[in-house]
Image (spheres, rainbow, N blue to C red):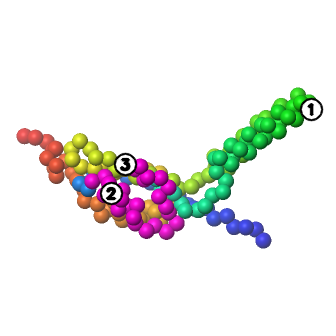
Amino acid sequence: MRPMITRLRTRAYQFSLRTGKPPDDVLGEFAQRPMPGIAVAERGPNYLVLRPQQRRRYGGDVAVLLGLAIVLAVLILTAVTPVLILLLPLALLPGLPLLIDNRPDLAISAVADDLGGTRVTVHGQASSELAAALDAYLGSLPRLSLENIGGGPQT
């Protein structure tokens, strides 16, 4: 029996708009929305980073430790014969799974602009469910155009 590896299908997601809501409200409302399988991985004063809730045991810290162990082992084995120094590039192997990892990371930023509105920008990889939740929320935000704030062409 072969274990099934499920891989999330993602697509590039980019969106930008101007709204009249304050940046804290935009980020706070989106962070409080229930999204199955998606969690806020990082939150700053002007941004959110969303990632799948999957628990990962193998990360960058484990890859670095394995790489250091390989380097140490190769250097010790080099005492037997200097030819074994050619095995030193094997220390890069623990980092390969992290390089080919395709998790749907997505960043949302909300920054107040000089004209009194908020610029909301979304960029990253999104699953279809996350893209639908983003479309629904961003579509519900009140748009702010130059005419709304008095910054349009002056006569």
Q: Are marks 1 and 2 in contact (CB under 8 Å)?
A: no
Looking at the image, is mark 1 or mark 2 earlier in the sequence? 2
Q: Label 3 amino acid?
A: Asn
Residue 42 part of the magenta segment: yes
What is the spatial separation of the Cα atoms under label 1 and label 3, in whole angstroms? 56 Å
Q: Label 2 amino acid?
A: Val
Q: Is residue 53 left or right of residue 134?
A: right
**What residue lies at 58% left-to-right and 62% top-to-bottom?**
54
Location of mark 3 (residue)? 46
Residue 121 horizontal/vertical position (percent):
37, 50
Q: How crowded is mark 1: few (under 14 residues within 10 Å), some or many (20 or more)?
A: few
State the mark number for residue 80.
Answer: 1
State the mark number for residue 20.
Answer: none
Indicate the quadrant where residue 5 lies.
Answer: bottom right
**What residue lies at 27% left-to-right and 53% top-to-bottom?**
22
Indicate the quadrant where residue 55 lies.
Answer: bottom right
Residue 8 horizontal/vertical position (percent):
57, 62
User: Where the N terminus falls, by quadrant?
Assistant: bottom right
Residue 65 part of the magenta segment: no
Please identify the residue farthest to the bottom as the structure is shown.
Answer: 1
The secondary element bearing badge 1 is classed as: loop
Task: Give the residues drawn in magenta, as a range.
Answer: 22-48
Q: Residues within 10 Å of mark 2 (few under 14, many from 20)?
A: many
Looking at the image, is mark 1 or mark 3 earlier in the sequence? 3
Location of mark 2 (residue)? 26
Towards the viewer: 90 or 10: 90
